[in-house]
Amino acid sequence: MSVKIKGAPLQYANALRRICLNGVPVFAIDTVDVIDNSSVMSDEGVAHRLGLIPLKTDLKRFAEPSKCSCQSKSGCSNCRVMLVIDSGETDTTRTIYSSELSSEDDTVKAVSDKIPIVQLAPGQKLKVEAYARLGRGSDHAKWNSANVSVLTHTDKPDEYVLTLETTGALSPEQILVAGVDELESRLQEFKQTISELKA
Amino acid sequence: MLIPVRCFTCGNLIADKYEDYQNRIKSGEEPAKVLDSLGFKRYCCRRMLMTSVETIQQIIPFYEAIQRRYLEVQSELE
């Protein structure tokens, strides 16, 4: 998606660009409990692949663990979602896809059903419990809200074009709206800090 | 082992299109055209699909053989 930004200073437009890139929280699997894994891929390998799967995000329903009212390390239903894979027994070699990732919440699910997680030979099993949470791209690239966020000049001064591309966790429109809010709250926080310094 | 879930460089989701890509390449289509039709514009994502080798396919047959042998032994014991 491309948006034309008119009348805003370059500094504001660039701050918005940076926040759209990695400042908006999105869901990603963060903790994986491996119950049974006899596949050829190591536990870490499976966990890494699970972490990178983009999950559909609903920003209104969930809070970041650091800002959640539960304030617990293990998380609550407002800041954490559990996803389970249980392959069961197989007679033939088959691939476990992201469609088998069953979520306890209907909104938080894999963006695509066709992401291969691991391939199992007959007799091999995979059973994991994964916990997804909101996070920011500044912590880990799996939480990057947009994978392309570019600001380009036009021939007129004070007019820029912001191009956004996402993996599907949030739509570019949602990222932009959330990005504006995020920038405003950061500026507010900055103002607060400055005024406390003066006093 | 398997196709990486995301592009190393830009973080775009690629894994879900790999199977389709492989099938179409094997049926004789031009890789460049397949990549275009799958919507890969940047060369970072294009190289991910073009150069990935799924080594898991080379390892799995051994485990299939182990399972076959196991079943054979089981049936002999009975």
Image (spheres, rainbow, N blue to C red):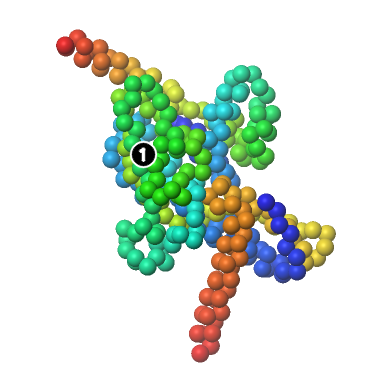
Residue B78 lies, in percent from the top left, at 16, 11
User: Residue at horizontal 46%, vertical 46%?
Assistant: A109
User: Residue at horizontal 35%, vertical 19%?
Assistant: B64
Point out the residue furthest to the right here. A155
B69 is higher (above) or lower (below) than A199: above
> Which quadrant would residue B41 be assigned to in this image?
top right
Residue A66 lies, in percent from the top left, at 40, 65
> Which quadrant would residue A129 be assigned to in this image?
top left
Point out the residue furthest to the top here. B76
* Crowd around label 1: few <14 · some 14–19 · many ≥20 (10 Å): many
User: Residue at horizontal 39%, vertical 23%?
Assistant: A93
Residue A52 lies, in percent from the top left, at 47, 45
Residue A62 seen: yes
User: Residue at horizontal 55%, vertical 38%?
Assistant: B14
Residue B47 lies, in percent from the top left, at 61, 34
Q: Which residue bears the numbered disc 1?
A: A85
Amino acid at circle 1: Ile
Comparing B46 with A161, the one in front is A161
